[in-house]
Amino acid sequence: MNVLVVAAHPDDEVLGCGGTIARLVEEGHDVYIGILGEGSTSREQKREDADLSLVEELGACSQRVARLLGARDLFMYGLPDNRFDSVPLLDVVKIVEELISAVQPDVVYTHHVGDLNIDHSILGRAVITATRPLPGCHVKELYSFEIPSSTEWTFQRLEPIFRPNWFLVIRSYFDAKVKELSMYEGEVRPFPHPRSPEALQAIARRWGSVVGVEYAEAFELIRSIR
């Protein structure tokens, strides 16, 4: 099975489904990762004032994380961080369509569209558009994931609300998720921030308890064709 994870920023692939990726790879599936945004440049008032060495460092981190996860390949595109709304939606859709064409995934994971982060929301919509079930579409399952410190911070005021209905047990893979995230040193925060290891554990245990297991990652099934 070919699996494609489409994320907006370096670290989103880990926060959203790092345990799932590790499990799928161990089960023998081919996992590909696409990261469309550059990361970090939104920290400056103007994008042109950003330290490009930080962007390069994030890209290198993404490469190391992908190797650690055992991903078959990593695709990076360098869209402006937290400024996806400055790019025509059609252009974002075209990037995703090219990625879909290259990978021919059976399953796709991406962001939930009702997310506080504009890049997450736009990318989620672009992926749904790019994977619309036209004749010949290879994608049979499409899932959205949450991003701690972004999805929950809408406080259920943005529609649609993230309503997970598909859960993957990651008890044996949670430590790998924390290790992967730790490689993004500038993105990890101390507890009680949602991107702290302690908070990630609480989230995994919370979703696990919802479905009667110890640790789980939660997803919303958008479409499944059988």
Image: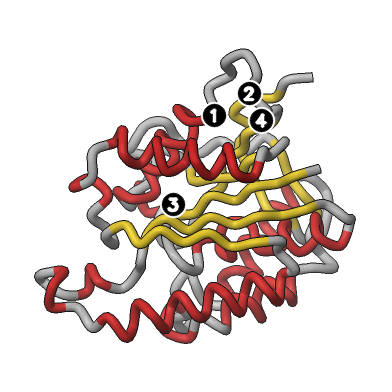
Q: Is residue 223 left or right of residue 212?
A: left
Q: Amino acid at mark 2?
A: Cys
Q: Amino acid at mark 1?
A: Thr
Label 3's element? helix
Residue ID for mark 1 = 131
Q: CA distance from mark 4 to mark 3?
A: 28 Å
Label 4's element? loop
Q: Residue furthest right?
A: 27
Q: Is residue 73 above or below residue 87?
A: below
Q: Is residue 93 left or right of residue 40?
A: right
Q: Earlier in the sequence, mark 1 or mark 4?
A: 1
Q: CA distance from mark 1 to mark 4?
A: 7 Å
Q: Is residue 213 left or right of residue 93?
A: right
Residue ID for mark 2 = 137
Mark 3 or 2, closer to the camera: 2
Q: Earlier in the sequence, mark 4 or mark 3?
A: 4
Q: Earlier in the sequence, mark 1 or mark 3?
A: 1
The reply to whether callout 1 and callout 4 are in contact (CB within 8 Å) is yes
The count of marks equals 4
